[in-house]
Amino acid sequence: MLKPMEPVRYVDRLNARYAAQGFPPYRWTVNEEAPLTPLSKPLADSRVTLLTSGGVSRACDAAWDPDARNDFRLDEIPADTAASAFQVHDSYYDVTAARDDINCVFPVDRLNELATEGVVGAIAPRLWSGFMGRIYKRTQLRDVIAPAWAEELRLDDVDLAILVPA
Amino acid sequence: MGLVARVVEEAGIPTVLVSTGRDLTELVLPPRSLFLNFPMGNPFGRPGDVGRQRQILCDALELFESVTEPGSIVDAPYEWGDDFTSVVDRTLGAMVPGGG
């Protein structure tokens, strides 16, 4: 029996890479406290949406720039999009599994199944792909872009959101 | 994306983050997170593994009922099976501005 693998220390590894390339140390966002909003109704009555930052787009839409920086593009993805109708472009992670089965990063089939079975009340009409990695304009993200997305969720009467970073 | 979770939560919509980077999530501290000790690119497991994908999604949803402490990171009890450090090293360079 192999010893369980320790979680990868991404921060240390990235800091080492920054230093090796002569960049100043990356200023990580560090928060000591977090907000918490309780779910206002049972899961079985809740409308759920999903967000991926993994360079996922519909095959009929444009591909993501796999090396995007400060890209505030945000795609609306109809919740009934077939799992076979996606493309994935992102140099940030190994996209092999996601291309083989989009549910590895964006479990659209599984969420539709849970909605059909009544585990959750409904799947929201719009799912989302955006906030791809390497956004360094954090103030704009926090004060403008993310609040605008929250407003879109409100328009869809979303009760909870599942966020899947790449 | 943890930052986005915090903003949406503050706007009154509860969120859960499904993370494969435990240390990254600890820094940003989203409202509630499920950590999978899986490679980036596989937060819901392997292609075609419908049962595990579904279980992870259900585990994430369960946090809306179980988490009462803001910033909680819950460790999912699944093992990936092989060491994926070499996969990480292949893609990590792209996360640094200069690439490579």
Image (tube, coloured by chain):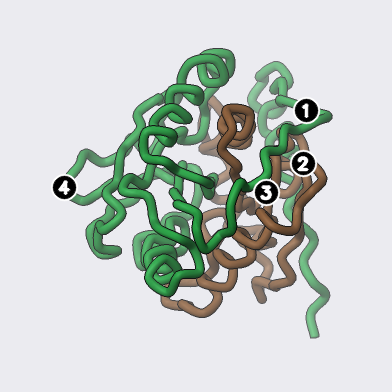
Q: Chain of mark 3?
A: B
Q: Residue beneath label 4, please?
A: A60
Instruction: Nearest to the eye among marks 2 and 4: give it.
Output: 2
Can you tell which mark lies on residue B71?
Answer: 2
Q: Which residue is mark 3?
A: B21
Of tags 2 and 3, which is closer to the observer? 2
Mark-to-mark CA distance, 2 and 3: 15 Å
Residue located 51% across and 34% down the image: A133
SS label for mark 2:
loop
- Amino acid at pointer 2: Gly
Label 4: element kind: loop
Whether marks 3 and 4 lie on the same chain = no
* Mark 4: amino acid: Cys
Q: CA distance from mark 1 to mark 4?
A: 39 Å
Pointer 4: residues within 10 angstroms few (<14), some, or many (20+)? few
The colour applied to the residues of chain A in this rendering is green
Q: Amino acid at mark 1?
A: Asn
Image check: B86 left or right of A166?
A: right
**Which residue is under mark 1?**
A31
Q: Position of residue B17 (x, y in %)?
A: 61, 47
Side of A11 where B86 appears, left or right: left
